[in-house]
Each structure stands twice: as C-alpha cells, then as structure tokens.
Amino acid sequence: MHFKNIRTFIVLLVFACILTNSYGQKKKRKEISNSNRGTPKLVVGIVVDQMRYDYLTRFSSKFKEGGFNRLLNDGFNCRNNHLNYAPTYTGPGHASIYTGTTPATHGIIANDWYDKELDRMVYCASDTTYASVGTASDAERMSPHRMGVTTITDQLRLHTQMRGKTIAIALKDRGAVMPGGHTANGAYWFYGKNEGIWITSSFYMNSLPKWVTSFNSSRKVDSYKKEWNTLNNITTYIESGLDNTAYEGLFEGEVTPTFPHNIPALWEANNNYDILKHTPFGNSLTADFAIAALDGENLGKDGITDFLAISFSSTDYVGHKFGVNSKEIEDTYLRLDLDLIRVFNALDKKVGKGEYTLFLTADHAAMHVPAYLKDNKIPAGYVEFKSLKSKLNEFLNYTYGTTDIVKNFSNFQLFLDHKIIKNLELEVHKVQETIAKEVLKNSFIDRVYTAQQMWGQQYTKGVPYILQNGYNQKRSGDILLVLSPGIINYYNTGSTHGSPQVYDTHIPLLFYGKGVKKGATAVRTEIPDIAPTIATLLGISFPNGTTGKPIVPVLN
C-alpha cells in the first residue's frame, strides 16, 4: 500500500475508534441513566431520637405545611409501627433500623453492656484501635465493629461498586456510626465541651474533608449560644403541661425549669457547648451540617444513588431532662418541624423534587414521668435496684454460700458465673430458674425469663417475643427482668425508656418521595421492616441479617 494511503487509513481508523468509544461512553451513560430511572438519586434516612408516635398527632395543628405535615399529607404513614425488641435504647435502635434485624442478630444489645469474654462493660461504638479525627481529645475513638451484619447503606455501597456515597450525621456518635454501617464514606458527630465541632474517627478517614473544616471554622455553632425562649407565645402551648412543675429537671444553675432558659449564663456550669445538645438548637445545628453535606459531598448529583443518614438527637436530651409532657418538648418539636422544612427545601433545590426518597422514624419512644402519672391516679412509680441487690445477695449466700455466682447486673439482666456454678456441681438452667423465681417475688417485677427459655422457646407475640428479639445468645445474660408497667429505675424528674412496654415501642414511621405511595396503614409494622422496604424500592440486596419484611403498601 502506498505510504500516503497507509497514513490516510490510520487516520480514518483512529477517527473511527474515537467515534466508537464516544458512542460507547454515551451508551454506557444512557444505560446507567435508564437503569436508575425508577430509583432515587438520594435516599435520606431521618431518625428522631426518643420520638413517641403520638407527637405526630399531638402537635399536628402547630406544625407547618412543609415539615412533618408534608410527610403526613403527601407520604405514607405507618400508624402502628413498633420496636419489636428490648431494651429500647439508642444504639440498638439505630442498628435495627439500618440492618433490618434485631439485637438477637446484629449484636448491638444496648448502648453499653457487660462483655462476658472481656469481663467488663463495653460501649456499642467504641474502638480503641482507631483514633479520633478533628479533635485533640482521645475519647472519641469509634467504629461499627461490634455490629455483626451489614446495613442498608452497606448494601447500597456494594450494589454500586462503592460509587454511591454514604454520609451519616448525628450529635451522638452511635447515632452516626450505626447508620453509616461498615462502608460509610463519612460518619460525623458533635464534640461539645470547649470545642463545639463536628468530628469523626480514623476508621473512616485520617483527616476531615475541607467542607467539614470550613463548617467548623465558620463557628456557626456560636450563633446558638443564645436564650432559649418559646418559638410561639407560651400560652398557646396547650398540648403540654404547666411550665413550672416538679416533674422536670433543671440545668445546673437554674432555680426553676421555666422559660426562658438563659443559655449564655448557664454555659460554663453545663459543660459549655454540651448544653446545646439539651436544647432544640442542637437539632438546628444538625440540620445546618446536613445541608452543608449535600454540597460538600455532592450527594444526589448523578445517576448513582447516594444515602444521607441524619439523626436528630436533641429530642432525646430534652425528653430526659424535662419529660414528654413538658413545654420544652413541645417547643423542641415545633422547632424541629422548621428544621425539617429547611432540610426538605434544600433537598428540593439541590437534588430535585421527586428525585429523592425519604423515611422518618425513631430509635425508641418514652414514657410519661411516673410522678406525674401517680399524681393523676395512674399506677406508676420508681425502683432502686439497691434493694433488689441486697435481698438477692442474702438469698445467694443462703442458697449457694456465695454472692459471686452473679457476675453482673445491667440492662435488666443478671449475668451468672458459669465456672462457679460448675464448681458447685450445679446445672446452669436450674440455677437460672431458682434465681428467677426469687427475683419475681419483688413487687416491682412484672415477669422474668431465663436464658434457657430464650434458647428453647419460639415466642411469636407479647413481651417474651420482644425480649427474645433482643436476646443475643453470645452477648446477653442469664436472667431477664421486666419491670411492671409504669415503673422505672430513673430520676424522679424527666422521662426515660428501655422497656418492652408499648409506651417505649410505639414510634412513627413515615415514607415520602420517589417510589412511595401516598397513604397510611394501621396494620402493625416493625422497625426491621424499614431496611428491606428501602432495598426493595432500590432493587438491591437486603442487609445480610435481615429478618424484617418489605412493607408492600408503601411501594409505588
């Protein structure tokens, strides 16, 4: 072939390759676009810490159109949604929402629990093999290593070959670590004290990304160092009790639990920036940071689905301090409604209306302050476990000649020393039953179950079903105690949670956005149903420990 013809041939060949490659890239992008046409660009999971279901109805007339009511009016409302395990705490709650299963499977049996192998208490998210990132403090060393299964966020990352992003945000570390799963691009939580910054762990990264350092440097947090007064005229807060009651706790330095709360004056006595967690401003700061993450991480900007997990923690702090019937709780939820509006508007603008899917739920609910119930002639009260331990020790000494047969009592469970039982030539299940029967004699104990029962029976309803879902064979104790309804082991002020009773298990579950039908159901749904519902909507694999089922009426 002539040299000139050869050169012309090569040029034409290269040009043809370029055209073919360009066509291939366009086809590939089109295929990705087509494959994601029915799926959202972004999934947003919102967990409101310590939110009772009836807050949706109790405060609905005060909510604006663009927040909670937007989800209620245009989304799908699961009115009979429950935690199906106990204890009902923050760590297990976030883990159960995102893994689609219960502590029996995922292993997060409490916030803190007695580790039978290490013979000490452990924290659900602590991990000393990693370092804190973004703070000089060495205290915030966290990872999800104690959660033994995948999350819906992990499954999305795996499905997209790690191209879809997961970002998790909460004031509480466990509220970010569990939702982020094992593969999160970032999990961030608030470090208060003298710093007032968002931080993370070296499990995720070795240094904070620029957008996080910029947010911290902006000192947006300092704008919330201000008086906390009611959003509306306090006389309109008729959905809650009196402002000054004996059922509410106090900030250090306060004389009465009343509005306005002078946050600047109370600052140092309440551990500086940590006081913001106990006000609705902690939720506002969380919303600020979540909105910043949308741009900082370019979430929902392409055809590959991302996931943003947000947990609003201040509702829990306020509930614990002031109680579920306080003016403070009402104000906190009215302000949270405004923060949700800001988040939803940012999603509309930055991701696009109809381009994201969102769910809102809670990690647990809470009960009324027992003192308030008692004053209204409703059976309720308090118990100190010191009396239980004293009586139990007498029984143990008399029956077995030692009190060391019980190694630990925590999370309403007794852990026995199996070595001592063996040395006494006793059978473990008989010792469990004997001690359980003795504990049941206490007036404030409603019922007891043994590990032998948890292993040998298959419960399908009621309290034992809830306990069994929370019972992990490797981590849980030998004897499980259930306090009588209305009885708590807590302060005389403020609300708490943790029991298998309905006031701790009934929580909201709302779905909204792409792929979600408009409607509601009163059929019972459970917390592990959330992850498989989202997985079905996305067309991805369920988390590998899933025991929940997709909520079919939700799906469009």
Image: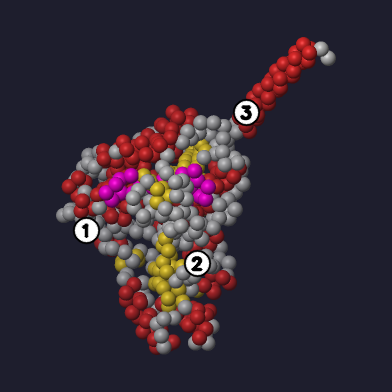
Q: Amino acid at mark 3?
A: Arg
x and y percentages locating residue 266 in the rendered image? 19, 49
Residue drawn 41% across and 46% down? 188
On-image quarter of the C terminus: top right
- Whether residues under marks 3 and 1 lie with C-beta atoms below 8 angstroms apart, the answer is no
Taking the image as drawn, is residue 23 in sight? no
Measure how far apart labels 2 and 1 are at the Cα level: 39 Å
Q: Which residue is mark 2?
A: 475
Q: Is residue 183 left or right of residue 51?
A: right
Q: Amino acid at mark 1?
A: Ala
Residue toward you, 347 or 234? 347
Query: What is the crowding at mark 3: few (fewer than 14 residues within 10 Å), some, or many (at least 20)?
Result: few
Measure how far apart labels 2 and 3 are at the Cα level: 48 Å
On-image quarter of the N terminus: top right
Q: Secondary structure at mark 1?
A: loop
The numbered disc on residue 521 is: none
x and y percentages locating residue 300 in the rendered image? 50, 33
Taking the image as drawn, is residue 407 in sight? yes
Q: Which residue is mark 3?
A: 29
Q: Is residue 474 above or below residue 174?
A: below
* Quarter holding residue 67: top left
